[in-house]
Amino acid sequence: MNIIEAIILGLVQGLTEFLPISSSAHLRIVGVFLPSQSDPGATFTAITQIGTEIAVLVYFWAKIVRIVKRWALSLAGKVPRDDPDARMGWLVIVASVPIGILGFTLQDYIRDVFRNLWLVAAVLIIFGLILGAADRYGARKRDMDEVTYPQGITIGVAQALALVPGVSRSGATTTAARLFGFKRTTAAEFSFLMAIPAVMGSGLFEVVHGLEHNDPGPYGWSGVIVATVVAFLVGWFVVAYLMRYLERGSFMPFVIYRILLGVAIMVMLGFGVLTPFANS
């Protein structure tokens, strides 16, 4: 049964990681409706995100290799540091600093306080409304090579907000990028690229934490591995679909979904169907 639940959660992770609806919130919520009624936990969540991040590496492989090469050559002085790809390498590094610092220093909150379903529901609604406003009223002109370092840092701070389940890493970073006037596809692509160091670092940190404490979560290491593989397979199709969709579609369907989900969670909490913390 644990493996079946892990597969379900892997599907959820793969389906929701790249959409601005918060994969961590969905894992948190779906977990309590499965037979074991367990919160998958921060360790399980972070490790399975490695699977979806590998999907990003596969999908954007050519671009990522080019960025890494040009960035490395810029260090050696063989290409200008303002080369667009070299600059993107620096932007990804700079944008990853806020979540790296906060993710390390707020571990106790990440594993406990931030997983309160009242908080999850509230941020689903609040950040959904902000995303809707940014997408509706933000300009749609800027491309990837126009991202500045101050903008990169600001978008990185937005990414750090996703330490709270419900905010959504892609949702927060896309919102910030849209407020700066970047196209939807540009906002999504930069969001995916800048997430690579943060997600991989967080996932590897949780692997080490799980090994040190012999605590991979309620589904064991076999469940974590299966869920991560499933998340990778599903995630690749989702990122490919989303990039095509954003060429013409808006974020409004996701905004509506976030609000409805947040309200539904609050109603279930109010009637005692759900409790703020799993098994509480």
Image (cartoon, helix red, strand yellow):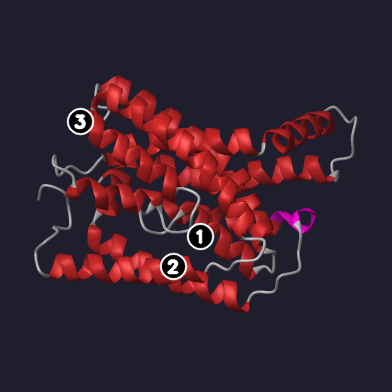
- Is residue 20 magenta-colored? no
Task: Estimate the spatial distance between the alpha carbons at disc 1 and disc 3, rounded to whole Å.
Answer: 32 Å
At x 10%, y 69%, the residue is: 271
Q: Residues within 10 Å of mark 3 (few under 14, many from 20)?
A: some
Mark 1–mark 3 contact, CB under 8 Å?
no
At x 57%, y 53%, the residue is: 242
Q: Secondary structure at mark 2?
A: helix
Q: Secondary structure at mark 3?
A: helix
At x 30%, y 20%, the residue is: 212
**Sequence order check: which comes first, mark 2 or mark 1?**
2
Q: Position of residue 257 (x, y in %)?
A: 39, 67
Task: Name the residue carrying label 3.
Answer: 2
Q: Which mark is residue 127?
A: 2
Instruction: Kindly indicate the quadrant of the structure image that contains residue 44.
Output: top left
In the image, 124: left or right of 139?
Answer: left
Mark 2–mark 1 contact, CB under 8 Å?
yes
Q: Residues within 10 Å of mark 1 (few under 14, many from 20)?
A: many
Q: Report the amino acid beneath label 1.
A: Ala
Q: Which mark is residue 83?
A: none
Q: Position of residue 57 (x, y in %)?
A: 60, 34
Task: Estimate the spatial distance between the alpha carbons at disc 2 and disc 1, rounded to whole Å.
Answer: 7 Å
Which of pointers 1 and 3 indicates the residue nearer the eye?
3
Task: Estimate the spatial distance between the alpha carbons at disc 3 and disc 2, rounded to whole Å.
Answer: 33 Å
Q: Report the amino acid beneath label 2.
A: Phe
Q: Report the amino acid beneath label 3.
A: Asn
**Sequence order check: which comes first, mark 1 or mark 3?**
3
**Sequence order check: which comes first, mark 3 or mark 2?**
3
Task: Name the residue carrying label 1.
Answer: 172
- Give the main secondary structure of the magenta stretch: helix
Q: Position of residue 182 (x, y in %)?
A: 69, 64
Tell me where the magenta segment starts and ends, as one range. Answer: 144-149
